[in-house]
């Protein structure tokens, strides 16, 4: 329910279409909010720095390890083999560095993402919350990523094993895998605004399960954008801004969910909703 003057008018619960369209609200919010741009660039900067440092360290380590295994070659073909293995080790080391950087960037970028969540809440006229602190925000980001992985990875691994055992099952396992990935991604992004408000795990689960269509549409939209790992990290600011808008649209339409959290009470919300909630 949203108050409009003295009359209370119900908001419809967002469905699949609203969840899918939330990606546009995330882009729109960042484009209209220049003060969010420095924070939106943080994941890209962190990913670049970590990739360079970790890849350099991994390449050096891999080439040193190969050299220690093979020793000093006395023949031309021995030296050629050592050189080839060193290059293979360097490439594998660089890929390992990139993988580690992709895993570390979201939690290390959490303080900047928290700033974007706060700005999105301010644009929605949500009362401000108590700051959590730098290390607590990093912990929240790490926990969001870990919980989503604990949900999705075992199921995806099982579906992959079924495909290996019975190839025609791909017609069933592929759609199921897409659904699991979408829900895991939605959970991960929803976790940013909800965890920062101190919402417990079971309450977050109840919100998602009560709004499965919106969560699925939201997750599928971002899964289409996040299919490239680096692109997924770079679009995290868009994701958290869109998740914030969608979460509060859900809460506005469901007063019984998380009643301890504030609601928007703007007089013109129903007649002229902000762009983040217009979809």
Image (spheres, grey):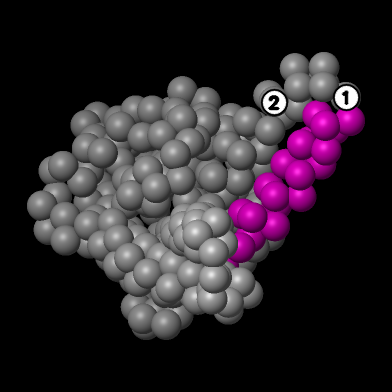
Under circle 2, the secondary element is helix
Magenta run includes residue 152: yes
Q: In the rendered view, does 150 fall on the left or right side of 94?
A: right
Residue at 72%, 41% (x, y): give it: 156
Counting from the top left corner in percent of width and height, residue 191 is at 51, 57
Determine the secondary structure under disc 1: loop
Answer left or right for 66 relative to 102: right
- Relative to residue 245, is residue 122 drawn left or right? left
Q: Does the magenta stretch include residue 241?
A: no
Q: Which of 48 and 32 is in front in this view?
A: 48
**Nearest to N terminus: mark 1 or mark 2:** 1
- At 53% from the left and 44% from the top, the residue drawn is 186
Q: Report crowding for label 1: few under 14, some 14 to 19, many 20 or more residues within 10 A (C-alpha).
A: few
- Disc 1 designates what residue? 166
Spatial CA span between label 1 and label 2: 13 Å
Q: What stretch is highlighted in magenta?
A: 140-165
């Amino acid at each position: 329910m949203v108050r409009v003057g003295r009359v209370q008018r119900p908001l419809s619960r967002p469905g699949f279409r609203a969840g899918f369209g939330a990606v546009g609200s995330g882009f729109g919010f960042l484009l209209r909010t220049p003060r969010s741009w420095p924070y939106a660039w943080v994941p890209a900067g962190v990913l670049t720095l970590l990739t360079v440092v970790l890849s350099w360290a991994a390449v050096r380590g891999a080439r040193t390890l190969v050299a220690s295994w093979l020793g000093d070659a006395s023949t031309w073909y021995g030296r050629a083999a050592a050189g080839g293995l060193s290059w293979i080790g360097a490439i594998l080391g660089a890929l390992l560095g990139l993988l580690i950087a992709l895993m570390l960037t979201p939690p290390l970028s959490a303080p900047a993402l928290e700033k974007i969540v706060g700005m999105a809440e301010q644009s929605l006229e949500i009362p401000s919350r108590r700051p959590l602190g730098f290390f607590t925000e990093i912990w929240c980001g790490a926990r969001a990523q870990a919980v989503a992985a604990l949900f999705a990875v075992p199921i995806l691994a099982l579906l992959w094993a079924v495909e290996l055992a019975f190839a025609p099952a791909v017609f069933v396992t592929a759609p199921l895998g897409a659904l699991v990935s979408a829900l895991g991604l939605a959970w991960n992004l929803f976790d940013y605004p909800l965890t920062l408000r101190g919402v417990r795990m079971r309450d977050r689960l109840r919100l998602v399960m009560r709004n499965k269509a919106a969560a699925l549409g939201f997750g599928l939209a971002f899964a289409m954008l996040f299919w490239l790992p680096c692109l997924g990290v770079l679009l995290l600011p868009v994701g958290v801004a869109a998740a914030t808008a969608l979460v509060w649209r859900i809460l506005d339409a469901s007063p019984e969910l998380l009643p301890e959290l504030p609601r928007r009470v703007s007089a013109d919300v129903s007649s002229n909703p902000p762009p983040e909630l217009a979809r």
